[in-house]
Amino acid sequence: MECWHCERPANAVCSFCGRSVCKEHAKNLPYLLDSFRDKTGKLKGLAVSDAIWCGTCHPKDEPVELDGLE
Ligand SMILES: [Zn+2]
Ligand SMILES: [Zn+2]
């Protein structure tokens, strides 16, 4: 696979969209693995603080509604 940006061999894959990127173009973003409610009903997220990000896609901060997928 080649880097999305420079077409050199890729070292990593974006955690959000799956594009491949080289070390030079890979960026880091927090990645939300899972979310759940604790005993008090507060919504908590389980996140990786520096997941690989391609720098091109736009991960949403908020979960999106999945109407029509049920
Ligand atoms: Zn690159
Ligand atoms: Zn991406």
Image: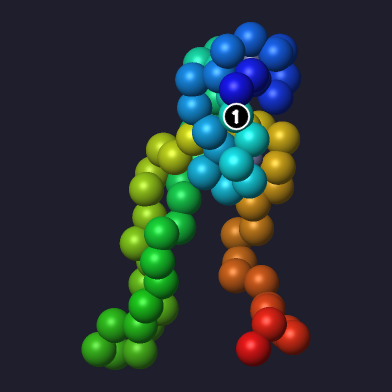
Quadrant of the rendering where the N terminus is positioned: top right
Instruction: Measuring from the top left, give residue 10's x and y in whole percent.
Output: 56, 19
* View quadrant of ligand 1: top right
Graded by Cα atoms within 10 Å as few (under 14), some (14 to 19) or many (20 or more), the crowding at tag 1 reads many
Callout 1 secondary element: strand
Q: Is residue 9 above or below residue 20?
A: above
Instruction: Measuring from the top left, give residue 8's x and y in whole percent.
Output: 63, 10
Q: Is residue 1 above or below residue 59?
A: above
Q: Would you say 11 lies left or right of 37 here?
A: right
The answer to whether one can see residue 16 in this image is yes
- Whether disc 1's CB lies below 8 Å from ligand 1 is answered no
Write down the quadrant of residue 51 in the picture: top left
Most extreme residue toward the top is 8
Q: Residue at x 49, y 20 (%)?
A: 11
Q: Nearer the viewer, residue 66 or 44?
A: 66
Q: Is residue 6 above or below residue 43?
A: above
Q: Residue at x 41, y 59 (%)?
A: 33
The answer to whether one can see residue 53 in this image is no
Tally the numbered discs.
Answer: 1
Q: Residue at x 72, y 35 (%)?
A: 56
Q: Nearer the viewer, residue 6 or 62?
A: 6
Instruction: Measuring from the top left, give residue 53's x and y in whole percent.
Output: 56, 36
Instruction: Measuring from the top left, give residue 57's x and y in whole percent.
Output: 70, 42
Amino acid at the residue labelled 1: Ser
Q: Residue at x 64, y 20 (%)?
A: 3
Looking at the picture, the colour scheme in use is rainbow
Write down the quadrant of residue 21 in the picture: top right
Q: Which residue is mark 1?
A: 20
Q: Is residue 25 above or below residue 16?
A: above
